Amino acid sequence: MESVIITLPRRRSILNGYAFEVFGDNATGTIDSQHPLTDHPIPFWGGIPCSQGHLYDGHLAGIHVDHVIPDGHFSGRHLNAEHLWPATEVLFKTRPLYFGAFRFAAATMDQYGNKNTTLTETAQRVVNSSPRPASALERATFDPLERRMSFTFTPSPDLSSI
């Protein structure tokens, strides 16, 4: 089993309060855009209060002391992004996956929850591993006339959760 780490760049155009959701295809070839893999939207600027503008923030909060437009001056890879603004990557780790060709896409939303309906394919990964084995194999019945035996077992937790 293997988890895939989805990396999204946090660029100058992404404002404080913006978030993203990750979608996947569960190795079917078609990305399910209705059910995100993320439990909740993941903020690009986590831990930083949203700036509401000069007259809405406290006088020494928000844009005055907490950050420089755009947010996060001296965070991440300073001077490596567009026009020398700070940049970094935001990560999302998938649940453990096993065997298949998996595709992932991301969709962003603004600070008010308005979702971008266009999915951007972000990653494609082939996972070539097996689920954990079944356990507790026991004989359940035996029919001597048919010479047929049946068994019970506990399936792999990886298969039973799908």
Image: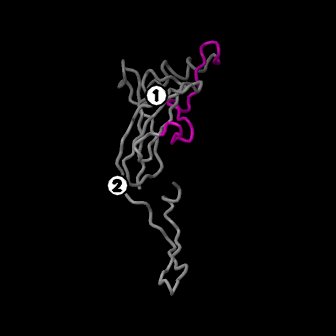
Q: Quadrant of the N terminus?
A: bottom left
Is 19 or 105 nearer to us in this picture?
Answer: 105
Residue 100 part of the magenta-drawn span = no
Residue pictured at 37% horizontal, 51% vertical:
100
Question: Residue 42's x, y, as percent?
Answer: 53, 35
Residue pictured at 43% horizontal, 60% vertical:
131
Question: Residue 17's x, y, as percent?
Answer: 55, 26
Q: Is residue 134 left or right of residue 80?
A: right
Q: Amino acid at mark 2?
A: Asn
Mark 1 vs mark 2, CA separation in Å: 30 Å
Extreme-bottom residue of the structure: 144
Asked if residue 33 is positioned above or below residue 139 in the image, the reply reads above
Q: Amino acid at mark 1?
A: Thr
**Around disc 2, counting alpha carbons within 10 Å, would you say few (fewer than 14), some (14 to 19), or many (20 or more)?**
few
For label 2, the residue is 128
Which callout, 1 or 2, points at the residue further toward the start of the chain?
Answer: 1
Q: Are marks 1 and 2 in contact (CB under 8 Å)?
A: no
Find numbered disc 2 in the image and state the secondary structure of the residue it sits on.
Answer: loop
Q: Which mark is residue 118?
A: 1
Region of the chain picked out in magenta, as a range: 32-58
Viewer-nearest of discs 1 and 2: 1
Magenta stretch, main secondary structure, is loop
Residue 51 part of the magenta-drawn span = yes
Find numbered disc 1 in the image and state the secondary structure of the residue it sits on.
Answer: loop
